[in-house]
Image (cartoon, rainbow, N blue to C red):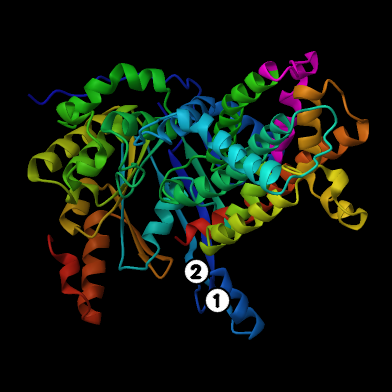
Amino acid sequence: MDRDIASVSRTRGVEEVYDSAVRAPLLVTELANLWNYRALIRLLVVRDVLVRYKRSLLGVWWTLLNPLLTMTVMWIVFSHLFRFAVGVSGVPYVVYLLAGVILIIFFQQGTETVASSIVFNTPVLSKVYVPAEIFAVSAGVAAAINLLLSAIPLLIFQLVLGVGIPWTILLVPLPILALLALCVGLGLAVASIAVRFHDVLEFNRVILILIGYMTPVFYPIAIVPHAFQVVIKLNPVYYDLVLFRNLIYGDSLSSWQTWLAAVGSGVIALAIGLAVFARNWRTAAAMI
Amino acid sequence: MARAPVIEAFDVSVAYRLARNRTTSMQEFAIRLLKRQIHYEDLWALRNVSFELLHGSVLGVIGANGAGKSTLMKVAARVLPPTAGRIIVRGHVAPMIELGAGFHPDMTGYENLLLYGTILGNDPRDLRRDAEAIADWAELREFLDVPVRSYSSGMVTRLGFAIATWADPDLLVVDEVLAVGDERFQERSRKRMQDLMSKGAAVLLVSHAMATVRELAQTVLWLDHGHAVMLGNPDEVVDAYLAAQHATGSEASLGRSA
């Protein structure tokens, strides 16, 4: 009746040694962690993508429906009520709009879930040794997978409306990765404050909505007065969106300056986010 | 046979930087910052603590609340790096602090087993293979597909214990775990720990139950306000600790099972 657990040989193999005096460079530690905990990342991503809607009627289909509904509302409001003479070069407004909506949802959802994944998992993270960044990266990757799923309706629209699917779509993962880096970096920076002050998560939500309006999702940048265009061009998400649209339906490679701004902002945000997080997180979490 | 110790701690010190008026909202913090009402003070939770823990042995840690026992566990579990000093931990650590704290109530027992086991550093494939054996030990086999929110606290503890001890850890960091659950579970978990120790696992045992400490530990560390008051033979340290408790006339309940 009292059977014992069969003893197992751990797959890790090498005996691990933790020495508090040995500090590897941040970049080395982070990359090693990502590799060593890849099984955990996979598990967390699958859970995040599938379990998010576990108790809902439509399940994973929400991932597809959510941007479509947002897009439909915006389409009715801006195309019919306000009668925007949207001068988007040669592309139906629906395609322009949907591409913007799914990318901005990725940015907002990604940044928010990266930050909240750290905050909500503090009970485990303050008792078990596991690199907290693993939870952040997993949340970001799950948001990126939701983006890929919600790109399917966009591609259908492109085919039905005669826009077609250009070969440049093969490069679409690049701006997505740049934006993922931005999400993880920003989310980690927010998380390192939010562990101490929970209202920062609410504040962050407002900021994300603001950034959404500062991004040409439903309007073309050309209709914005010149003075305000400068403000929009300070927003890194703008460059990711330009690249995303040009590659997924525009059949254009964009300028190198756009690439530089998109990739550069992602890398810088990720580096700053990781550094700030590494400095603040342990001490803040230890007090909980 | 001379294996290096599982833990070597050299003058480990941990300081918490505490704001005297703790705030949990950014808004309040900002207002106080403007009014210059934020004062910091460094609280030393551990001060120059040194010890060694060998394979197959138990180090008991005793002391009043706030003596630094939890901080020491967090340092040994690698969650908290020491502010000063150095600690070396060799091998796989099974932290058994608030067992089940990492469970998600909405997920089933099986999903939690998989996730928590992987967080502890195990391969999910091994966990899937052995899930039923783990559940059998926890006597929860028929509850594996039930969300953890409907588990009793005893069931949560059993599952947490079974997962944490499954992969033959080299170090168990134990916080009163033997004091929870029914008698049957206490006896079985103790037997499981002794099995692991016979294979070379070391135990860092934090407890208020002096009888347990006397019985299990080979060495006892007495902490007071972060300082190591005494380190040595269990009976001597526990007796000295209890005598000091009587002298100050505080909490007689500390020696409840002595």
Query: Is the C-beta separation of discs 1 and 2 under 8 Å?
Result: yes
Task: Label 2, secondary structure: give it.
Answer: loop
**Image point 88% across, 28% down: which residue?**
A254
Mark sitting on residue B24: 2
For the point 16% across and 73% down, the residue is B252
Q: In this picture, is A215 found above or below A199? A: above
Left or right position of A269 against A130: right
Disc marking residue B28: 1
Q: Which of the 4 image quadrants contains residue B201?
A: top left
* Residue most extreme to the top: A167
Q: Chain of mark 2?
A: B
Q: Is residue B248 above or below residue A69?
A: below
Classified by dominant secondary structure, the portion drawn in magenta counts as helix
Three-letter residue code for mark 2: Thr
Q: Quadrant of the C terminus of chain B?
A: bottom left
Q: Is residue A8 above or below residue B162?
A: above
Q: Judge from the rendering whether residue B71 lies leftward or rightward of residue A103; answer left or right.
A: left
Q: Quadrant of the N terminus of chain B?
A: top left
Which of the 4 quarters of the picture holds residue A174? top right
Measuring from the top left, give residue B113's x and y in whole percent.
32, 31
Q: Position of residue B66 (x, y in %)?
A: 37, 68
Q: Is residue A179 located in the magenta-colored stretch of the structure?
A: yes
Left or right placement of residue A239 versus residue B254 in this view: right
Residue A185 in the figure: left or right of residue B9 = right
> What percent of the width, then of the height, locates residue B153?
19, 47
| Badge 1 amino acid | Glu
> Magenta stretch: residue B177 in it?
no
Q: Residue at x 20, y 75 (%)?
A: B251
Judging depth in this view, the residue of B118 and A159 nearest the camera is A159
- Segment tinted magenta in the rendering: A159-182
Name the element at disc 1: helix
